[in-house]
Amino acid sequence: MKNIIAILAFCLFYLACQEKKLNNLTIKDLDFEKAKSLMYKDNDSAFFHFNKVATNSVDSLMVAQAYTFMATIQTESSDYFGSQESLILSLRFLNEQKTSNFDCLSSTYNELGLTNYYLKNYKIALTYFEKALYFSADDVFRLTILNNKALVYRNAGKYNEALLIYNRIISKKNANTVEYARILSNIAKTQWLQNPKYNALPKFLRALQIRVKENDEWGQNASYAHLADYYSGRVPDSALYYASKMYHVAQTLASPDDQLEALQKLIKLSSPVLAKKYFERYQNLSDSLQTVRNSEKNQYAIIRYESEKNKGDFLKAQAENIEKQKDILVKNIGLGVLGVILISAYFWHRKRKEILKNERELEVKNTELKYVKKVHDRVANKVYHVMSEVENTPHLDKEKLLDKLEVLYDISRNISYERNDIDEENFAQQLNQMLKAYSSEKVEVDIEGNHESIWTAVSSITKSEVSCILQELMTNMMKHSEANQVALHFEQKNGNININYSDNGIGISDQFQYGNGLSSTGNRIDHIRGTITFDTKAEKGLKILISFPIS
């Protein structure tokens, strides 16, 4: 009887879990197809190929189907606990939120219900059948699940609940069909179990008639079992007849479980001589079947073990390969970084070399400019100063002239030596003397406000620069302005010293361009953070404002 339920479950599961189509293309797996073709022909090979699919496939739905088929095979071998393990694995690959998984969810829960039914865990079995119904949208499969649920109620002694389901199912079946005969026979047996005095014979015989007509050997096997049980307490000869019929059909079907059930009936109903003969057959078949099933259980366990071991070895090898690739990647990255560092160092060296070269060139240029500036400031302006003094002093003391020339000689010889010839304490007086040296019969130089007090907080560097700036202005005045009156006004105001220069010469135009001297003057003004402003709009002459901070 168990074989009928198992085969029916497989057929319905096969229909429920048909290949899903994506983008109008059928997804196929050769191992999966081969395994399905071997079901109930060579279950060991079928299990092996299903296990390959479960282990190797990347399609989660196909993996779930493979595990459920494996569970069906294990149930057939009475390996109910192994079957439940496979079914739990199947559920791990199914998503109850995806409608595409519903058919297989329904089949998997139905199979879980059957395994618990065989283990007589009726309450748990009913729970799984309810889940199977929830996910099933196939009317035929729903009726099968309901039939399984009714079987649980019947075996649990809840006959009313079983009959309610059977009557609901049979109302949807066409008469004279195999399914109708199955439900009719189950109804009759349930009613008889509920009431031993109930006359179930007409329904039993009607179901058998349909099954013989439809050549339903599995159905005939069930009918003979029901009739043998029914007649067992009433007409032993008839019971023995139907038990014999069941035994022959079970042999034809090669169903060891049904043969054992039939032999149990024959032992009970036969004479002692025949009963002993049937008992020997029963014992041999039972021992043989137990050995085969133990072997199958071990075989399935070995297949699973080898598969897991191979998978573990593969994952280990894959992990080692990943580790090696990681090491290679790290080495490559290290070499790459080293290469980048070396290349960067090379270009940095070249750049640094170029910078140093430019710095040396700039230093040479600055040195040249420095000496040019020194020659201009220390020699040229002083020479012009001495020339002006010689020209404008009628009775020049030769000793003083020689002293001045001696100074010029020392400056020229030690041109690279930075020398400060500023008198810190008498700077205003020294500055006045230098400015007055430019006065003559033709040029009158007027100086106002240049007192020692305004220079008290001024640094020696600033004093030196101011002296050179004013000397440059006076030299340019003598050379180019044609002025006969020059005025310089000094004042200290708001932390600055302001020097206003003016002359009545020819002035300068808007397009005036600085020569070397005035360019140097501009650099000096910048050096002391000051400003110099030329008034080119004056009607006559030139006005210049020099302003710089005291400190």
Image: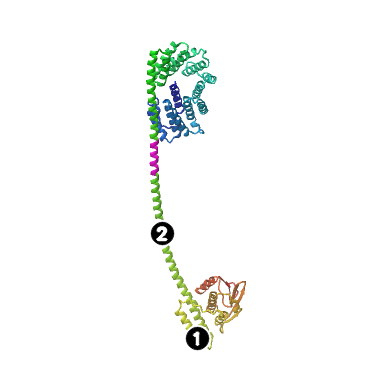
Residue 439, position as x, y percentages in the image: 56, 82
Q: Which residues are magenta?
A: 308-321
Residue type (three-letter) at the residue carrying disc 2: Ala
Say if the magenta span includes residue 180: no
Q: Amino acid at mark 1?
A: Leu
Q: Residues within 10 Å of mark 2 (few under 14, many from 20)?
A: few
Q: Please name the residue shown 39% across and 17% down the image.
A: 279
Q: Quadrant of residue 311?
A: top left
Q: Is 288 left or right of 119, judged from the image as shown?
A: left
Along the viewing direction, whichever of 66 and 72 lies nearer the viewer? 72
Residue where numbered disc 2 is placed: 345
Placement of the C terminus among the 4 image quadrants: bottom right
> Majority secondary structure of the magenta segment?
helix
Task: Classify mark 1: helix, strand or loop.
Answer: helix
Mark 2 vs mark 1: which is more N-terminal? 2
Q: Which mark is residue 4?
A: none
Give the colouring mode of the picture. rainbow
Task: Nearest to the eye among marks 2 and 1: give it.
Answer: 2
Q: Position of residue 241 (x, y in %)?
A: 42, 12
- Where 491 sits versus 147, above or below? below
Residue 427 image position (x, y, % from top left) = 56, 79
Q: Nearer the viewer, residue 93 or 378?
A: 93
Which residue is nearer to you in this view: 147 or 83? 83
Q: Secondary structure at mark 2?
A: helix
| Residue 296 to residue 543: above or below | above
Residue 264: x, y in percent? 42, 17
Q: Which quadrant of the figure contains the N terminus? A: top left
User: Residue under circle 1?
Assistant: 401
Calculate the distance from the C-alpha at mark 2 to the C-alpha at mark 1.
Answer: 62 Å
- Taking the image as shown, residue 409 lies to the left or right of residue 540, namely left
Does the image show residue 513? no
Mark 1, residues whose alpha carbon is within 10 Å: few (<14), some, or many (≥20)? Answer: some
